[in-house]
Amino acid sequence: MNLKTFVTGADGMLGTNVVLELLSRNHELVCLVHPSSKSTTLNNLPVKVVQGDILNVSSFESYLADCDYVIHIAASTSVWPRRNEMVNRVNIEGTRNLMSASQRAGLKRFIHVGSANSFDPGTIDDLGTEANDYTGWKYKNDYLDSKYKAQVMLLEEFKKNAFPVIVISPTFMLGEYDSGPSSGRLLLSMVEGKVPGYSKGVKNYVHAKDVAVAIANALTMGKLGQAYIAGNENLDYLTFFNKVKKISGVEKKLIHFPFPLALIGGFFSSVIARIIKKQPGLSYGMVQLMGIEQYYSSEKAVNELKMPQNSADQAIEDCLNWFRANNIKL
C-alpha cells in the first residue's frame, strides 16, 4: 500500500520539486494549492489537487483523514512592507491551523519548511548552524519574525505533546519550476540587464531539488523535534553574479556600490513606493537583508538526512534553462 502525503504550497518551486521526488518514491499525493494560484507546474501529474487556504481549516481538514504525512511548504514570503499582518496570519495562524488539524488526524510525521534566517548566520570562519539563536528581530521584518515564531511554536508542541515535527530550513533556493518567479527573479534581473551592480553581502545558495530530497528523506530519517539547515555554497554577490554571467553568456559590467549608498537608494525607493502605492524593486528593508553576510553550514542535513549537494552552478543552469524553456521573463 502506497504512503499518502498531504503537501501544501505544492505548486511552487520547492513544492513541485517535492511532489516529483515523492512521486518517484510511489507516494500517493494530495496537493493543496491556493485558489488564486496561476501555476501550471502540477498539470498532468498523477496527484489529487485540492484548492484551499490554510487560513480556512474547513477547506482542507477532511483531506488529512487518511494521510500518513504532512509537508507544509505554503507561506507568505512578502518582505514589503516590513510590517504585514497578512504575512503573520499565513505563516503563524495558518501553520497553527495545519498543526492542529494534523494532530486531530493522527498523522505520523509533519515536515515544516522554515527558513535558515531563523538562525543567526555565522562567519566565513565559523559557519552558522542550528545551534545559533535568532537575532532577526532587529530588522523589524514580519516575514523573518513569523517564520521564526512558527518554528518555535512547532518545536514547543513537540516538547509538550510529542508532536512529530521536523523543520527543514532552506537557505536561498534556485532551481526548476519557479513559475512565479520567486528567488529566480534575481537571475532573470541579471540576465535581462536590470542589475546595475552589487554591494556587500553573502548568501548561501542551494538547489531546490536537493532541499526536496532532504524533505522526502525527513519522512523516515532525521530526529523529531529538530531543525535542519538545508543549504550548500556560501557566495558573495560578485562571485555569484560572475557565475550567472558565465553560465548565461550575458556579458555585463557590474558597478560596485558602497553599502551606505545602496541603503540610501533603498530608502528613496521605499519613500516613492509609499507615495505611488506600488512595491519597490528594491526597498530599504530589502537592501538591509541583502547586506547580511549569511554564512551557513548544512553538515547536519547532509549527515542525518543524506541531502545531496549539487553545485550553485548546476542550480543556476537548471533554473535558467527552465525559464528559457517556459518563456519566463520579468
Image (cartoon, rainbow, N blue to C red):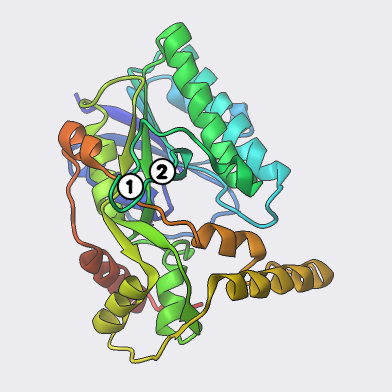
Spot occupied by residue 142 in the image (x, y as percentages of width and height): 64, 44
Give the farthest residue toward the front.
Answer: 125
User: Which residue does the numbered mark 1 point to in the structure image?
Assistant: 296
As drawn, 240 above or below 196? above
Q: Identify the secondary structure beneath mark 1.
A: loop
Quarter of image, res 236: bottom left
Disc on res. 254 = none
As drawn, 241 above or below 119? below
x 19%, y 23%: residue: 1
Of the pair 156 and 162, the residue shown nearer to us = 156
Quarter of image, res 68: top left
Quarter of image, res 106: top left
Taking the image as shown, residue 321 lies to the left or right of residue 307, namely: right
As drawn, 196 above or below 278? below
User: Which residue does the numbered mark 2 point to in the structure image?
Assistant: 116
x 18%, y 44%: residue: 24
Verify CB contact (< 8 Å) between mark 1 and mark 2. yes
Crowding at dot 1, Cα within 10 Å, few <14 / some 14-19 / many 20+, comes out as many
Q: Identify the secondary structure beneath mark 2.
A: helix
